Every structure is written in C-alpha cells, then in structure tokens.
Amino acid sequence: MGTWTLLVLLLGPVGALTPHSGYCIGKGCFAWFRVPSDFRTAQSHCQDLGGHLMTVRTSVSNDVLSVLVGNVTGSFWIGLHRPSGCPEPAAKLSGFQWVTADSESDFRNWLQNFTSSCSVERCVSVNGQDGFRWRPTRCGRSTAGFLCEFGSTEQCQAQAVGPGESVSYMIPYGFRVDDLPMVPLGSTATRFPSGTRSICSSAGWLPAPWSCEISVGGCEYRCAPGPDNDPVCVCPPGRTINPGNKVSCESSGLGDPCAERRCQQICFMDGACGCEHGFRLAEDGTSCCPGENFMCVGFTSRRGLCVDRDECVSAPCEHECVNTPGSYRCLCYEGYVVDKASPDRCKLFCGKDECPAVCDPNDGRQCYCPEGYVAEERPDGTFCLEIDECAFSYCDQGCVNTFGGYVCSCDPGFKLVEEYRCVKTDEEGPEEGAPTPDPTSLNEEPDPTHRPSAITPGGLVGIIVCVVVLITLLVFAAHLGLRQRGRKSSSLDLNNIPTPTCEQSLNINISSAF
C-alpha cells in the first residue's frame, strides 16, 4: 500500500464528526463525541473514522475514560453489548462481548446490582454519576454521546524542539494534542513560532506542502499543482505565501499582480495562472479545462462535463427514492418515517393517539405497532394505542407525554441527570436549554431526555389478567346479593323455584353488577 493511499484511509471520510477531545497512549487513541446517538449509530460514526466504540479491557483504559469524560454530565456508549440470546452466568463478561467480537478483558466494572438476565438492556453505557460503572442499557436509547477507540500500527516519533519552540500535533481522528512521545500515521505537526508544517507518513515526517488531496497539502488557504506539477500553496488576492514556512499567507505590501490577470481558478504570487486538481491550463493562459486526471464525484463524465447520475436506478432505498443533483434522497410510504440511524430504511410511525396496526396480509394475527404503542384487538381489526408513560411516574418531577415516548423536566433550582432524575442546584431560574417539549414534533429523533416506553408485553398481560379477576369478583358479589335479597322478600318455597341456567345466571349477574 502506497504512502498516500494509507494516509487517505487514516484521514477518514469528508464531513466526519469532530470529537470534543481525545487522548493517545501507546499505540491507541481515544476520543469522545457529545453527539446524541443510539448504540448502532454511535458504532457507525466510530467506524466512519476508522475505529470502533471504546473497549475498556484494563484499568488503564478505564483511567483514560475518566480523563476524557470525568467532568461531563450524561451517559456515553462504550463498545460492550450482548449480540443475542440469553447470557450464561458463568460466561466471560456475563455473556456480553466487545464490538471487536471477543470477550477478552482484564477488567470488569459492572454496577453492583447488575444480574445477568434476558432483559432488553443489551448494550452498555457509562456516566460519572455511577463512577463510570458498566450500566446495561437499551440499545435503541439515545445517550448524550459515545467514546471511540483507534489503533495505529505505524507511528512517528515526536519532533524535537529547541529553546523557545513548541510543536502542536493534529491527530487524524480530529483532535489536537501538544505533548506526545509518538504520534499515529497521518498526524500533522505545526511548529511555532515559525509556522512550518509536516505530516507523519510511512517514510517519516514530510514537509508541507505535500499532496493537495490530503489536508489541503498543509496550506493555510489553498493547495494547487505548481508549474512543474509539484504541490504549492496559494493565497487569496492581496496576500502572498510566507517564504519561511511556505504554507501561511501574509500581506504582500505590493500591488496585486493577479488583479489584471483575471485567472479563472488560481493565480500564483508572480501573476501566473493555474488550475485546480484535475484541470489543466488552456491555451489562453487564464481559463481551465478538464485534464487527464479529471474525475466527477456523484456525476458521470461526458465530453469533459459532469452529468448527473441517477442513483435511484440501483434501488438504494427501502421505500421510495428521489434523485437529486449528485446524490439521492430516500422517502417513506404513509405511516412510516425515515430511520435516522439508517437513512435508507423506514420505521413505523403514528403521530396520533391511535392508529390501525400494520398486519401481515397472510396472517392477520401477526400485527405490529410503532414503539411506544400497544396493540388492541377490536371487532373491526387491531389498533395501536399510544401509551401515557407519564402515568407510571418514570420522571422525578415534570413529565410530558409524547407520541411514542415521553420527556422529563425539572423544577427551577434543579437540573436533569440520567434523563429522568432531578438534582438540586444553586441556580434559581429554570433549567437552561430545556424548553417545554412539543408533542407534535414527531419527525425528530428522541433527544437525550427522551426515554422509550418501558411497558413490556408481559406487563400488559398482567394488567389484563388483573382486570378479568376483578370483574369476576364483582359478578360473584352481585350474585350473592341477589340471592340474599330473594330469601328476605319471598314467601315462596325455595325448593320449588326453578334453578336458572348458567347462561341466565350470567346475564342476571352482569346486569346487576352494572
């Protein structure tokens, strides 16, 4: 694998998330992201950056976790989960495993009251209030963020610094550190006060400007192929490249040589015109046309032009697909919304107090409801009824029921932690950033204060059984009352009164009870 190919892989995709902070030790780097996500989405974000959710196999990695989020409120995903089935009490990690598909660990940090069971809490989160102990959590729940882990097989030794100098390193996973003995491949170093830059490659530290395709060649403004096709840094009109570091821009102090040239794309500090990567300078010396390395992204190249490609032809969406310039967008049928965890898929959606259930056309007994709804069978079909979770007192203080879930809030002088508990604070005003939720805001994913319904099918069956037993007792009591009243008011011989049939008795008792 070539040096630049390896660097491109390490730098990750364009538009990836930026972590709030990070830490590197040995050959591993760790970063935390304050991005509300469910477990699957968090793992996907880490994979996009070339890593995975953090594994906490040793006390050292647990100390790193404390350094990263020790002063942060909220819960964060780590890379521990139970893939399927019921765990065995004697199994490693109580039947859970790391996202790396193994259970090897020299460290265990479960909550004291944790017991291995077939519960729906199959993923693990941590928070400072628990001392970062491993808390089994519903995988679909949205936490305050997550922690990623990255491994580096190749590294560069930190650069030596002289008196009055310092070096800052930008790690390829999106965070900056200032003091490391070794840095992973793809890290960039900026030396102060000179401002010179270099990048860690398989061949060691390479000075800027390097390839324009990687971190803009290390240039402050733009990178472009020079007259000899070597990468050079360019600056906006009125500014010129610093001759000492060759990457930063400074005021030229002279007339702008590019003002009269009217270059189509790039103008060098001597007034010569140039073109972006993939284009070449035309014969007029100012305009640009597609070159040999011209490439269209999201489009099809035709006669030197980029023509939109219809991605919907390959049916990438579960329901409907709408082609857009250079891309596409997925839509869902009525009764569904796009699943933000997988934008190409759709999930059931109601948005009202009740909706008809979605049933298998070949088996009417197999019916499905959105999350936060319960199925009810009626003579005219099966319907999904919205559950009022606030009636179960899940919140310490304020609770607002929403379609498919609920949102907790706190009184003035309290703040919300763990998405449902209210803790006393020194503040007198209402909690900042916690407006009263709007139950009609239905197309947004649950935020960190939105908890899914906790009613299980077993709990629903228990409620139904209790109601049936209660009605039976009422009918029996009414029946006894009728018989006693009959003895007092009638002078007939009871032995001559015909005994009512079971059906007649049932009709009398029910009508009396109501």
Image: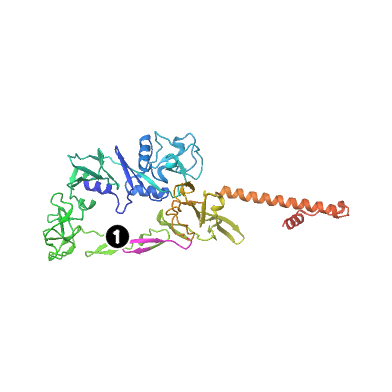
Residue drawn at x 17%, y 57% as measured from the top left: 235
Rendered position, 458 above or below 376: above
Q: Nearer the viewer, residue 504 or 340?
A: 340
Instruction: Give, as a single range, the part of the protein colored magenta.
Output: 322-335
Question: Residue at the location (26% across, 39% down)?
Answer: 180
Residue 359 is situated, as x and y percent measured from the top left of the image, at 53, 58
Q: Which residue bears the numbered disc 1?
A: 298
* Camera-nearest residue between 326 and 460: 460
Residue 478 seen anywhere in this rendered image of the structure: yes
Q: Residue at x 70, y 51 (%)?
A: 472
**Image location of residue 133, percent across then percent down:** 44, 39
Mark 1 lies on a secondary structure that is: loop
- Image coordinates of residue 64 in percent, x first then y, are 35, 39
Q: Amino acid at mark 1?
A: Gly
Q: Quadrant of the N terminus?
A: top left
* Relative side of 29 to 260, left or right: right
In-front residue for pair 450/140: 450
Residue found at x 27% / y 64%: 307
